[in-house]
Image (cartoon, rainbow, N blue to C red):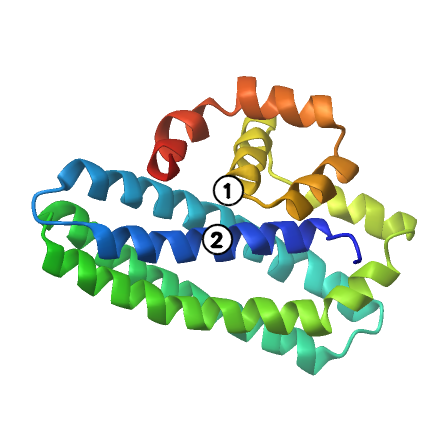
Amino acid sequence: MAELSMNQIIHAAVRRDVARTEQALRRLGDGDAARARQVQAAWRNLVRELTHHHEAEDEILWPFLLKRGVDADLLHEMESEHGAMKEALASASAAIDTAAADATKASATAAADVVARASEVINQHLAHEERDVEAPLGDLESDPEFKELSKKLRPATMVDAANSLAWMQDGAGQRELTALRSTIPGPVVTILTKVVARRYQREVAPAWR
């Protein structure tokens, strides 16, 4: 089985968080305000991570791939799908905010339904990107210009990078964890995740424990 790329590791984290957010919302009962706020915090983190990922693709990666001969119509589809995902995420965020404020089973179930609809939009895009864009990206792995460009796709600060790494690993399977440690040295991943990623460990991780 081929090793996962960093893009695929991120996609796996997105799919995982969307699925467990819906599940957590469906399990919420009346008056469970503390749990609702945990789910809200985890969802906001997902939106933050996914927004950074897609903005970097739209602003940096797609223009580069266009210069390297990747089909312009395909890249336009990617950007359009990002727009649809942004709308779906906004709708889900609003519903989750309502559920956190109301703390009722009815509002939590309504939010879960919105997240389920968003999941369809998100998963269709991720599958499309992995099917049609992953191969051109793989062909560029040894390209010096692409390697330099890839640095711009990373989080802006060490703290942001640490929180992203903690998120990617939270609930990940062995295949994702192995691929991540083949890209970034294991000791570096451990230090960043356990020592630097304090925001994630404090605000987000409790939602999934």
- Residue matched to label 2: 16
Q: In terms of sequence position, does the residue under pointer 1 or pointer 2 come before the other?
A: 2
- The image quadrant where one finds the C terminus is top left
Q: Secondary structure at mark 1?
A: loop
Compared across the picture, whether 18 is left or right of 159 comes to left
Q: Amino acid at mark 1?
A: Gly
Q: Quadrant of residue 172?
A: top right
How busy is the neighbourhood of tag 1: few (under 14 within 10 Å), some, or many (20 plus)? some
Measure how far apart labels 1 and 2 are at the Cα level: 8 Å
Query: Which residue appears at 35% of the width and 32% of the height?
Result: 206
Residue 154 percent location from the top left of the image: 65, 41
Judged from the image, the secondary structure of the residue bearing numbered disc 2 is helix
Hey, what amino acid is under mark 2? Arg
In x, y percent, where is residue 200? 44, 30
Seen in the picture, residue 76 relative to 160 is either above or below; the reply is below
**Pointer 1: what residue?**
171
Asked if one can make out residue 96 in the rendered structure from this viewpoint, the answer is no
